Image (tube, coloured by chain):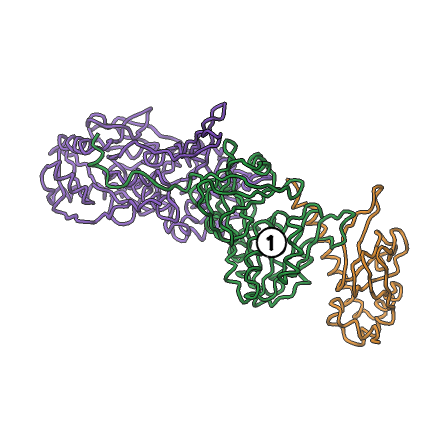
Chain colours: A green, B purple, C orange
């Protein structure tokens, strides 16, 4: 066959976003009963720069691939950090990966928190459960440029005191970077002297200027809805409340169709979206 | 990222390049394309339906075959003439040629240290020349170009296959009872502009004077091929006869879909009782999505040998009617057939417009014919309109 | 030294009440404090108090054979206790100071009398109590879903 006559284009595709890069696990930390943090370095040595709120498609070879938000420091593109909760077969393989293990990484993908646009404003960060992991890069970026922001508050709701994440860092953000940190738990234990209750119950104690506030929310959808409602009640515009959405994702690049929420491709248009864009879609059953 | 493979359809083309050929000339066209290195595909009769398959001779084509299509029904029939493109369409559009139902994305072998090294799979088949693409399917191809190539990330294998493909579109002369391309603005005559660029547009003309094929060039490559094919320069009679063929087809559309304000209607109808009613009949069998020329949902599957020494990742067609399509840990978002049908129809006719600027429906009618329950998307849309 | 009536307007619960109403309510109130671990009230005891917390945190607990489960907490800026309003006026839970607590304690019987005698005041007061109840019910209901738990 004389293919040269027929073909006009380059038939070899150099880069395919569906093919993973291999990373090696250089360090692990068991954060809670079911959650672990992995430190990963690219085998090819190339950096992986990302925006806070972006995710990668993380693959345990031979087991499967899932979207996982990046939980590391955006200032350090040499190390990829993921905080993974063990909730299924793939996330189990990832959360229990040992130092030296190789994982496949595609990405980073998606639209992040766009923290830079909150410069000059008050920032309220509200996390529920594992939702603190995707928000950590945003907190780190803000802390690195703390003077550029007004009042910065972190509200964090965890299931129990033992299931809190980044417990060594929370006091540091408060003490060294002037972040007002409030943590509440759904259920306490004997060690806990802090508040017990829903994270929305903390909203009333936050100091912010409603017309000049950016609110970043990540957690279960119900928690995000109720939190957004509490800030809307306090006068924050729906567009200034950003939520990080979760839907089934198989490609991460808008091609597989799984993550659609009516007109939105959560992987490409999100995962971080203005609440005004999704509010009406979240109360529609089975959309 | 791959280069944009979409060819500028109008480049260097003039009406004077158009040719008219007879049956021998049609064979020459096939030969010329094969001679240029293309794997030539065309409609062939297979398993009681029309499908795309390798074509070497005119006699490989469905000479004298037509079809009858109705809700839940597709039958080939013998025509009383020797029309070659005298059927409406087959079970599949050209979609599987460029976007196979299953393909390997990458293969990985373990290296000396036991680590998997993924390597992208190079697909060597083709390049394809596809003869006989209907206008509806041509528009579907254009939609796939937008979905799979026209955004931030491209489907790499699709890009390669599309870039090299030569497309001979064909006017529709005998639409089926399930057809509604006219209401979708996608047919029955292939036109440049909206829709996939094609290289040649063919209209089959069969009358007392004989069997003619008007070949209109739509790309520079098309002009080159026509020069090689030869035949006589197309005249006014050829053109007016071709126009009559498609005018007649316009008048014989089996169905109509009123698209006016359809997106807003669908968005406002999320709670309509229509979804419950249709869910009572829908079997969630996925047929509609498998035959739809624009449905593009895919899943990935990992296949590895028992020792785990080699593995491959495959991309396979998926369907929003599958219970796992919307799976999140804890369960699926769309648990009911009602929600899945609503997702499919709202996406196809509504949210597609927000996402890609056009409807996701080209009016080919396959979802109607191949639905075992005979559910008719045009009828369901009409029900919503009546309710509103 | 500021009087209780002068202090109350600064507390969110009393925002919007006029000075006459506040003076009337202050008649039912005394200042109190509790050391860490000290109980403000115990399950089953007659409920005769309504607390306005000015400082510190109080845990609402339920005793289990294996210890105490904290169901909710109330702290500075919040109020605690509505059992004085609902027959048979008995505490359903324990209220224990987590750290040093300063609060204003209102006598439940006194409040009931004032509210009964002045329906406008009674309505305003009840409206505020119902809001607190609603928030606590919302918090309890959503937490019932165990959203952060294993699914």
Above-or-below relation of A223 to A96: below
Spot occupied by residue A26 in the image (x, y as percentages of width and height): 55, 41
Q: Is residue A266 left or right of residue A210?
A: left
Residue at the image position 43 percent from the left and 31 percent from the top: B108
Visible residue check, residue B342: no
Residue at the image position 48 percent from the left and 32 percent from the top: B115
Residue at the image position 65 percent from the left and 66 percent from the top: A207
Nearer to the camera, A272 or A147: A147
Spot occupied by residue B73 in the image (x, y as percentages of width and height): 38, 30
Which image quadrant is residue A125 in? bottom right
Q: Chain of mark 1?
A: A
Nearer to the camera, B72 or A104: A104
Visible residue check, residue A160: yes
- The residue beneath circle 1 is A225
Q: Is residue B309 left or right of residue C9?
A: left
Please identify the quadrant where the N terminus of chain B is shown. top left
| Residue lying furthest left | B232
Nearer to the camera, B276 or C123: C123
Which image quadrant is residue B220 in? top left
Spot occupied by residue B283 in the image (x, y as percentages of width and height): 49, 33
């Amino acid at each position: 066959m004389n293919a040269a006559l027929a073909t006009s284009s380059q038939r070899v595709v150099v880069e395919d976003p569906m093919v993973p890069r291999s990373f090696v696990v250089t360090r692990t930390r068991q954060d809670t009963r079911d959650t672990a943090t992995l430190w990963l370095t690219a085998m090819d040595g190339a950096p992986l720069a990302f925006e806070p709120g972006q995710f990668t498609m993380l693959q345990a070879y031979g087991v499967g691939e899932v979207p996982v938000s990046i939980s590391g420091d955006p200032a350090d593109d040499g190390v990829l950090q993921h905080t993974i909760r063990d909730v299924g077969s793939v996330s189990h393989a990832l959360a229990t990966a040992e130092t030296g293990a190789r994982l496949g990484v595609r990405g980073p993908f998606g639209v992040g928190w766009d923290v830079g646009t909150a410069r000059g404003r008050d920032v309220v960060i509200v996390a529920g459960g594992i939702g603190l992991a995707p928000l950590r890069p945003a907190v780190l970026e803000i802390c690195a440029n703390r003077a550029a922001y007004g009042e910065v508050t972190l509200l964090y709701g965890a299931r129990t005191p033992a299931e809190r994440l980044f417990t060594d860092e929370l006091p540091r953000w408060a003490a060294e970077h002037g972040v007002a940190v409030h943590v509440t738990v759904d259920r306490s234990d004997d060690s806990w002297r802090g508040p017990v209750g829903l994270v929305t119950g903390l909203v009333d104690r936050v100091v912010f200027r409603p017309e000049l506030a950016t609110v970043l929310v990540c957690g279960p959808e119900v928690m995000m809805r109720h939190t957004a409602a509490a800030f809307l009640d306090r006068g924050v515009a729906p567009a200034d409340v950003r939520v990080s959405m979760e839907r089934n994702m198989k490609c991460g690049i808008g091609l597989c169709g799984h993550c659609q929420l009516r007109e939105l491709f959560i992987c490409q248009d999100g995962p971080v979206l203005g609440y005004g864009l999704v509010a009406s879609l979240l109360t529609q059953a089975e959309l | 990222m791959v280069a944009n493979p979409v060819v500028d359809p109008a480049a260097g083309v003039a009406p004077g390049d158009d040719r008219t050929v007879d049956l021998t000339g049609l064979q020459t066209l096939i030969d010329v394309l094969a001679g240029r290195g293309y794997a030539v595909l065309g409609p062939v009769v297979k398993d009681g339906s029309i499908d795309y398959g390798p074509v070497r001779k005119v006699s490989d084509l469905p000479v004298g075959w037509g079809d009858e299509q109705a809700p839940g029904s597709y039958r080939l029939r013998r025509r009383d003439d020797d029309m070659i493109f005298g059927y409406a369409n087959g079970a599949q559009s050209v979609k599987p040629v460029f976007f196979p139902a299953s393909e390997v994305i990458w293969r990985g072998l373990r290296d000396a240290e036991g680590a998997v090294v993924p390597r992208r799979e190079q697909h060597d088949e083709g390049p394809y020349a596809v003869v006989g693409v209907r206008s509806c399917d041509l528009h579907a191809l254009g939609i796939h170009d937008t979905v799979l190539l026209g955004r931030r990330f491209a489907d790499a294998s699709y890009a390669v296959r599309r870039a090299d493909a030569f497309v001979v579109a064909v006017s529709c002369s005998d639409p089926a009872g399930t057809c509604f391309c006219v209401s979708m603005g996608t047919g029955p005559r292939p036109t440049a502009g909206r829709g996939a660029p094609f290289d040649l547009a063919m209209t089959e003309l069969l009358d007392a004077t004989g069997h003619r094929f008007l070949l209109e060039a739509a790309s520079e490559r098309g002009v080159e091929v026509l020069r090689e094919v030869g035949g006589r320069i197309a005249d006014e009679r050829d053109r007016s006869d071709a126009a009559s063929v498609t005018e007649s087809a316009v008048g014989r559309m089996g169905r109509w879909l009123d698209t006016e304000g359809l997106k807003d209607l669908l968005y406002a109808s999320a709670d309509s009782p229509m979804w419950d009613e249709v869910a009572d009949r829908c079997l969630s069998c996925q047929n509609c999505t498998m035959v739809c020329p624009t449905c593009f949902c895919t899943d990935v599957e990992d296949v590895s040998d028992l020792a785990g020494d080699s593995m491959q990742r495959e991309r396979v067609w998926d369907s929003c009617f599958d219970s796992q399509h919307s799976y999140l840990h804890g369960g699926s978002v769309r648990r009911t057939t009602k929600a899945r049908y609503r997702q499919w129809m709202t996406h196809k006719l509504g949210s597609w417009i927000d996402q890609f600027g056009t409807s996701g429906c080209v009016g080919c009618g396959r979802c109607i014919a191949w639905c075992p329950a005979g559910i008719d998307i045009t009828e369901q849309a009409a029900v919503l309109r009546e309710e509103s | 030294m500021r009087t209780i009536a002068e202090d109350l307007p600064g507390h969110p619960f009393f925002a919007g009440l006029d000075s006459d109403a506040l003076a009337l309510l202050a008649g039912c109130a005394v200042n109190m404090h509790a050391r860490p671990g000290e109980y403000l009230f115990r399950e089953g005891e007659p409920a005769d108090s309504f607390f306005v917390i000015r400082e510190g945190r109080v845990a609402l607990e339920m005793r289990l054979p294996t210890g105490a489960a904290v169901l909710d907490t109330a702290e500075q800026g919040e109020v605690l206790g509505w059992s004085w309003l609902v027959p048979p006026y008995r505490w359903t839970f324990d209220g224990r100071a987590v750290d040093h607590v300063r609060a204003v304690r209102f006598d439940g019987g006194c409040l009931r009398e004032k509210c009964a005698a002045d329906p406008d005041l009674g309505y305003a007061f009840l409206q505020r109590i119902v809001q607190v109840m609603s928030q606590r019910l919302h918090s309890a209901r959503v937490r019932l879903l165990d959203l952060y738990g294993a699914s």
